Image: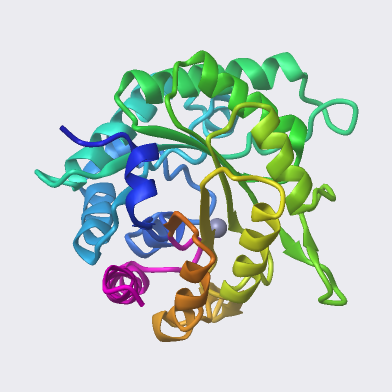
Amino acid sequence: MKKPLLEAIKERPLLGDGAMGTQLMIAGLEQGNCGEEWNLTHPEKVLAIQRAYVEAGSDCILTNTFGGSRIMLNRHSKADQVAQINKAGVELARQAFGDRDGYVIGDIGPFGGLLEPFGEFKESQVRQAFEEQAAALVEAGADAIIIETQTSLEELLLGIKAAQQAGAVCIVGSMAYDVTLDGSTFRTMMGVEPERAAEFMEENGAHVVALNCGTRMDMIRARDAVERYKSVTGLPIMVQPNAGQPKLINMKVVYDETPEQMVQGLAQLLDTGVNIVGTCCGSTPGHIRVFKRELDQFVESKRNGA
Ligand SMILES: [Zn+2]
């Protein structure tokens, strides 16, 4: 029997996966189209991407359900397929592991708007959308739920509560930080500092404190964030930074950090005691492959008492 994720990460750091969105684009998804619908219409393409991550060494795979809430799917007139899209997302990620034990993390991204009074979305509407998505992911057998790319504590809380209500045994809260213009620090778009986010997650019952995506949040900044998290919480930590910064080249968005550049920061990041390390936008199975090598070396050197 596979150990629960929260137990497995006590034994050694686990490897997450890399980008899904940018990989779907490479596989032919057009900008602005619904990538989550591909769980039903192009399952073989989603599966191929996730298999590539598993082959590269990922222990944890996020489901292709980032925009799988009713509010997000409604923008593509797919609100009637919330349950099917999320269920298929879990099944594909599970299938990607084949007969290997791996962890399927049900992905809930932002609902894509602002809550009242800043925006037009009622709290109840967002709560219902997250509850519906979390329920579909948990029922389909996800090992954990991640509420990711979050910038506001209000929205994060709705996600955490929805995952709890759905009966998720492991809930990951993941914030997207932006480095400030003067480069001195980082906080979310809504002004949330990492210490506050970590305290808030612990108070509200999340099991893993995470960060992903963000602007100019490279591996060094990710390590800073882990240390800032650790200054206020003993909860496990997951990080998934982007592969550098997006640049527009020939009308295509490309990310500029190669696997070799990114992996240079990995040993120091692992030294902080981080529990799950993956990568976000712009990364590829190539990034995960070099991460795998470095992570294995790290685990080996720990075992030898280094
Ligand atoms: Zn990202």
Is 261 on the left-hand or right-hand side of 304? right
* Magenta span of residues: 278-306
Q: Position of residue 229 (x, y in %)?
A: 67, 53
Q: How is the image coloured?
A: rainbow
Q: Residue at x 61, y 77 (%)?
A: 247
Frontmost residue, 255 versus 103:
103
Rendered position, 140 above or below 44 = above
Frontmost residue, 257 versus 58:
58
Frontmost residue, 10 versus 138:
10
Q: Residue at x 61, y 66 (%)?
A: 222
What kind of secondary structure does the magenta stretch mostly adopt? helix
Is 204 on the left-hand or right-hand side of 42? right
The number of numbered discs placed on residues in the rendered structure image is 0
Q: Residue at x 48, y 33 (%)?
A: 68
Q: List the single residue furthest toward the front.
A: 305
Q: List the single residue furthest toward the left.
A: 99
Q: Position of residue 248 (x, y in %)?
A: 60, 77
Q: Is residue 176 visible in the rendered structure shown here?
A: no
Q: Is residue 171 visible in the rendered structure shown here?
A: yes
Q: Is residue 165 magenta?
A: no
Frontmost residue, 127 versus 202:
202
Q: Position of residue 261 (x, y in %)?
A: 47, 85
Q: Position of residue 297 (x, y in %)?
A: 29, 76
Q: Is residue 300 magenta?
A: yes
Where is residue 53, by image quadrant? Answer: bottom left
Check the picture and name the quadrant holding the C terminus.
Answer: bottom left
Rendered position, 2 above or below 166 = below
Quadrant in which ligand 1 is drawn: bottom right
Is 124 on the left-hand or right-hand side of 1? right
Where is residue 1, by image quadrant? Answer: top left
